[in-house]
Amino acid sequence: LMTAKSLASKETVNGRCWFYSDDDDGISVYLNRELHAMNTVVAQLQTQFQDYLVSLYQQGFLDNQFTELRKLQDEGTPDFVAEVVSLFFDDCSKLINSMSRSLERPENVDFKQVDSGVHQLKGSSSSVGARRVKNVCISFKECCDVQNREGCLRCLQQVDYEYKMLKTKLQDLFNLEKQIVQAGGAIPQHFPSYTILRPDIRPCLDA
Amino acid sequence: MEVCNCIEPQWPADELLMKYQYISDFFIAVAYFSIPLELIYFVKKSAVFPYRWVLVQFGAFIVLCGATHLINLWTFTTHSRTVALVMTTAKVLTAVVSCATALMLVHIIPDLLSVKTRELFLKNKAAELDREMGLIRTQEETGRHVRMLTHEIRSTLDRHTILKTTLVELGRTLALEECALWMPTRTGLELQLSYTLRQQHPVEYTVPIQLPVINQVFGTSRAVKISPNSPVARLRPVSGKYLLGEVVAVRVPLLHLSNFQINDWPELSTKRYALMVLMLPSDSARQWHVHELELVEVVADQVAVALSHAAILEESMRARDLLMEQNVALDIARREAETAIRARNDFLAVMNHEMRTPMHAIIALSSLLQETELTPEQRLMVETVLKSSSLLATLMNDVLDLSRLEDGSLQLELGTFNLHTLFREVLNLIKPIAVVKKLPITLNLAPDLPEFVVGDEKRLMQIILNIVGNAVKFSKQGSISVTALVTKSDNRAPPDFFVVPTGSHFYLRVKVKDLGAGINPQDIPKLFTKFAQTQSLATRSSGGSGLGLAISKRFVNLMEGNIWIESEGVGKGCTAIFDVKLAISNESKQSGIPKVPANPQHVNFAGLKVLVMDENGVSRMVTKGLLVHLGCEVTTVSSNEECLRVVSHEHRVVFMDVCTPGVENYQIALRIHEKFTKRHQRPLLVALTGNTDKSTKEKCMSFGLDGVLLKPVSLDNMRNVLSDLLEHRVLYEAM
């Protein structure tokens, strides 16, 4: 097995370095190793991703609509969810700012504007599946209807808190996604099983 | 005149003499009178006396004679004339009757004599018949004995009991002194005394079989009288008996199983006989009678049959015992084999895990080491370590798999998986090597290839990886193409007619074509046999175990498929093709829609122009994404005015959000109605609303909307709605 030409050539593929030996054993070695490493890493990442996503649902951050959103993402629109979500967060921030301005002066509260803002927010959050945000909007709307400034302010604070929290969480989720893709795996689509490389698959390259 | 011999005396009779004459005559008369009386009396008594009239005649004669003598009494002295007359009459009568009687006797006496002879004859006959009846009775008795004997003999299947019973019964029936049975020894050269009636079993008493007396007995089926001094008969202690009883010997054929033909009676040409010797009691004048001999012969035959039955039974029981023993032994062997297999499997399983763990550690750490800074010598060493351990790991796995495959204990693990993704994953794995080796790889998936299938994903991947890996390994240049398609039949020969795959199964065909080293067509059959490696393939010793294709073939067979390799020769590349049977998964995308055909959205809605009006940017984007995913061509507007401006007859459906408070949204519907006077040109109008109570519905209807949808809309919902809408042009149920 000791060959004279076993000095490896170094190549860069996909941003990673492969040490490749110019014989058949090298291919076996590579595949075995890669598969093994990949499987471990990818499997871990995917598990992490799954668990995180499930926890978000369980904690009430996300609801079924988010699942629907994820369904709309395919090869043609690989960043659909990220785009929608980022638009949503931008929207949130804008609306919250404007509502905050409206509620600033206690004697001159434009409840109509606040109401429309809340309405928008509610619509956006339900389109995206941001459950907690949506729930807060519902109570926000009630406060608005009775023109309760204190209540509105409280709700506004809560909305702000919730959307920022969700933003952080989703950021983490997208990061995990990116890592998985970089490691060469596939994003888990379905709950609870997912098609990924099995850890114990190994190639038989010897004919 | 003087009839009787009485002489009348001339002189004056002596008084005494006259007295005596007087008395005698008197007694004669009395006798003469009493005789007929007696005769009459006895004749009356007897019923059968044919000659009555003879008696009458005789009686008359006697009476008259008596009368004469009586009358004579009176003629001794002077008598009167009357007396003389009576006397004369009597005498005359007597004369007549006597003559008549004399004449008659001539006729009668021969008859009487013949009666006598007949009587004698009958008596003799009676005596003879008595004798004969005695004989018959004896014979009947004998027959009864035979029947009973036979019954006794045949009522048991035990050989010893049969023989013992025979001797006992014979002894009893014929009142024998001794009865013995000589059986031939195994060698067939001697007769051994096996059973005796009265004596205790003597020790190993044998006689040679070739004695003349024995030959004589064996030569005939009859019972033969033999001399009491012959060796076979010298059983009793000779103790002063000067007249030994007669001895008879008879042969008893020992029939074998093979003697019983189906159609024939058992052949008595068998050479094996036993000898039965029967001895009458000594000092008795008894002789062997014919019927006794016949009895003995019959019994001998019966014994032969009974013995053969017993022999058959013994053999069959022996055979059965043997079979039972064999069964038990086989059972034990089977259980041992099972235990052995279980032990081996356990061992393999444990060893598998135990061996894999350190192996993985070695591989992983060696790989990590390889990526650090190393001197060339160190690199060389590390690479060698990696290569060896990697090959060892492969070998271990292959051996384990193969052993389980050959056992038949390997079962496919079926599950639902994405077929398209599988191919892409394999290619992703191989791509780096192919890139480095500068072998472009292309993947062609047939458009009708199902996406979600049910099968053993892991093993299918193993097969594809193996084949594609081989293609890469043995190609130095050229391109590699991987094609996956649905094949209609499972042989490579084109069938005469196409068979539609049954149920929801189909055959996946994968073709991997490379332009590499190629294979000599003669070597192709050897490829799939394990441990065989052709020299033309390995230009260098690759050290492989040669199991890869063998395992792949077994997996393919497990999946009810076929695998083969086509090559035009060395240096001309080769194509590996395999078919496997997979099932189409019912669930697609886990949405629970039954029987959705592949990519239905594109079929129904491809290029469908729709307009989405929503003031909320996020919600607008989501709706647009939804419709785009379904294949529609979507235009978005964010205000009513824009909507009115943009809407045209090309748009089939307009989705308008009516959530924002205000009635103006519904006005849009009216305006659109105004714009499109002709009904067929007007797009369908669907409201997207947040609440679906009756008032909203009624409002929508009143404003001329064709449908209402509850936000947020799910993918399936939208799909259904669109198809219903386009079909019916109206929709008020999608809530």
Image: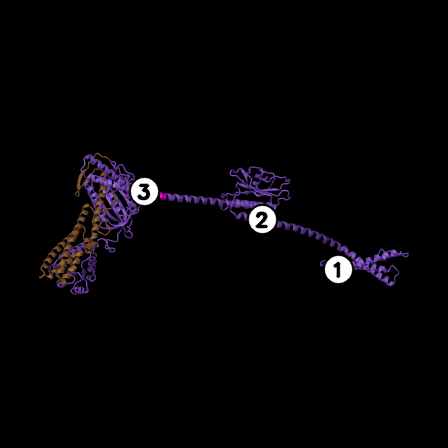
10 Å crowding of disc 2: few (<14), some (14-19), many (20+): some
- Which numbered mark, 3 or 1, is in the foreground of this view? 3
Placement of B729 over or under A184, stated as above or below: below
Q: Is residue B672 visible?
A: no
Chain shown in brown: A
Q: Are marks 3 and 1 on the same chain?
A: yes
The residue nearer to you, when weighing B50 against A160, is A160
On-image quarter of the C terminus of chain B: bottom left
Q: What residue is disc 3 on? A: B347
Secondary element type, mark 2 = helix
Q: Alpha-carbon distance for marks 2 and 3?
A: 75 Å
Secondary element type, mark 1 = helix
Q: Is residue B32 visible?
A: yes
Q: Earlier in the sequence, mark 2 or mark 3?
A: 2
Q: Where residue B693 sits: x, y (%)?
A: 19, 63
10 Å crowding of disc 3: few (<14), some (14-19), many (20+): few
Q: What residue is disc 2 on? A: B145
Residue B277 placement: quadrant: top right
Secondary element type, mark 3 = helix
Kindly identify which chain the residue marked by label 1 belongs to. B
- Amino acid of disc 3: Phe
Indicate which disc residue B41 carries: 1
- Which numbered mark, 2 or 3, is in the foreground of this view? 3
**Shade representing chain B:** purple
What span is colored magenta in the figure? Answer: B337-353
The residue nearer to you, when weighing B122 against A30, is A30
Q: Residue at x 41, y 43 (%)?
A: B329
Q: Where residue A140 sits: x, y (%)?
A: 15, 60
